[in-house]
Image (cartoon, rainbow, N blue to C red):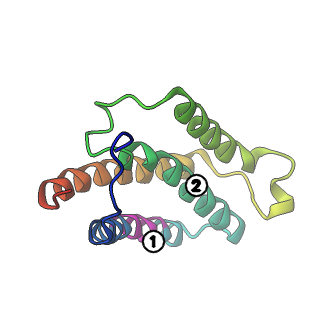
């Protein structure tokens, strides 16, 4: 695509957005439901929602950057470094002195673990959706 640029295929982009938007929304609802089920405080809800949203958005880049399985291609070192930095800062933020200033509060380890499970399921589901998507939708 670099040596021979192509025109954007709006139909393909629309199908891609609908497919992965649906997968993303499914896990947003799952996160919302978990936080309601656990009856967390408003501050913990806000914090957990932020952490899950940013971490999942950062990590999904590894899935959608290629039509191949994310574990079979090697991302650039700067992409890996930037993504891991974003994840680390996001997870650490609720435990810093500025957390109360932005309405965050430290999350219990159990909740952090459950958010990690949701993110892992999201990445796995997106990978499966990508496999199906590229099998059904030709570029």
Q: Quadrant of the image for the C terminus?
A: bottom left
Provide residue 88's location: percent of width, then percent of height: 64, 38
Q: Which residue is located at x 17 percent, y 61 percent? A: 137
Residue 98 inside the magenta-drawn segment: no
Q: Residues within 10 Å of mark 1 (few under 14, many from 20)?
A: few
Residue 24 inside the magenta-drawn segment: yes
Q: Camera-side residue: 89 or 77?
A: 77
Q: Which residues make up the magenta segment?
A: 23-31
Structural distance between the alpha carbons of marks 1 and 2: 18 Å
The answer to which of marks 1 and 2 sits earlier in the sequence is: 1
Q: Which residue is located at x 33 percent, y 31 percent? A: 73
**Dot label at residue 54:** 2
Residue bearing the label numbered 1: 33
Left/right of residue 56 with respect to residue 64 in the rendered view: right
Name the mark nearer the viewer: 1 or 2.
2
Q: Which residue is located at x 47 percent, y 51 percent? A: 114
Q: Residues within 10 Å of mark 2 (few under 14, many from 20)?
A: some
Left/right of residue 86 with respect to residue 73 in the rendered view: right
**Dot label at residue 53:** none
Q: Main secondary structure of the magenta part?
A: helix
137 over 10 or under it: above or below: above
Left/right of residue 11 with respect to residue 42 in the rendered view: left
Q: Secondary structure at mark 2?
A: helix
Q: Which residue is located at x 43 percent, y 32 percent? A: 75
Left/right of residue 47 with respect to residue 131 in the rendered view: right
Provide residue 96's location: percent of width, then percent of height: 81, 45
Provide residue 60's location: percent of width, then percent of height: 43, 49
Q: Camera-side residue: 7 or 52?
A: 7
Q: Camera-side residue: 123 or 70?
A: 70
Q: Exactly how many numbered labels are in the figure? A: 2
Q: Secondary structure at mark 1?
A: helix
């Amino acid at each position: 695509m670099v040596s021979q640029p192509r025109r954007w295929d709006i139909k393909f982009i629309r199908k891609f957005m609908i497919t992965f938007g649906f997968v993303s929304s499914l896990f947003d609802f799952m996160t919302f439901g978990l936080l309601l089920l656990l009856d967390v405080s408003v501050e913990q809800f806000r914090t957990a929602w932020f952490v899950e949203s940013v971490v999942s958005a950062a990590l999904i880049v590894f899935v959608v950057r290629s039509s191949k399985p994310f574990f079979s291609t090697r991302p650039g070192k700067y992409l890996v470094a930037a993504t891991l930095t974003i994840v680390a800062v996001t997870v650490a933020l609720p435990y810093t002195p500025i957390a109360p200033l932005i309405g965050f509060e430290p999350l219990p380890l159990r909740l952090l673990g459950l958010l990690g499970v949701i993110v892992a399921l999201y990445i796995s589901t997106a990978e499966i959706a990508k496999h199906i998507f590229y099998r059904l939708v030709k570029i």
